Image: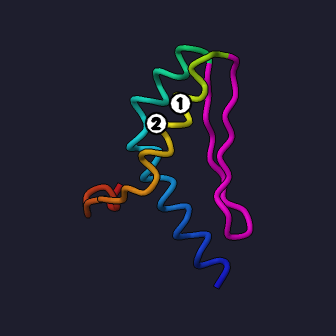
Amino acid sequence: MLAHSEVLASIYLDHLTDRLHPILKSASEAGLSAGFDVNKNKIHLTLSGFSEKLPYLLQRILQQMPIFDATESQFAQ
């Protein structure tokens, strides 16, 4: 069951990363970065960079996390 959950989490993170692309691109241009990883049925979020905007980046990511409205075409990618 663990492998199945990790696959689902990986699909979710792919979709989330696509949704966050504009935000993550702007953050990268400002010297900030965010990364996701799945390990033992847990999602890990890592933020790095030094800026007063880092809490704002975290807030924007967390706002998008519960939303999952993927279309069939997104899964086809």
Query: Which residue type does callout 2 highlight?
Result: Arg
**Which sits in the foreground, 45 or 54?**
54
Task: From this view, report whether residue 30 is shown above or below residue 55.
Answer: above
Task: From this view, report whether residue 13 is shown above or below residue 50.
Answer: below
Q: Position of residue 49 (x, y in %)?
A: 69, 21
Query: Which residue type does callout 1 highlight?
Result: Leu
Task: From this view, report whether residue 21 is shown above or below residue 19.
Answer: above
- Measure how far apart labels 1 and 2 are at the Cα level: 5 Å
Disc marking residue 57: 1
Residue at image coords 64%, 85%: 1
Which secondary structure is most common in the magenta stretch? strand
Disc marking residue 60: 2
Q: Quadrant of the C terminus?
A: bottom left
Q: Position of residue 32 (x, y in %)?
A: 61, 22
Residue at image coords 46%, 36%: 60
| Residue 40 inside the magenta-drawn segment | yes
Q: Which residues are magenta?
A: 32-50
Task: From this view, report whether residue 9 is shown above or below residue 56.
Answer: below
| Residue 23 inside the magenta-drawn segment | no
* Left-right relation of 6 to 50: left
Which element carries disc 1, helix, strand or loop?
helix
Residue at image coords 60%, 25%: 54
Q: Residues within 10 Å of mark 1 (few under 14, many from 20)?
A: some
Marks 1 & 2, CB-CB < 8 Å contact: yes
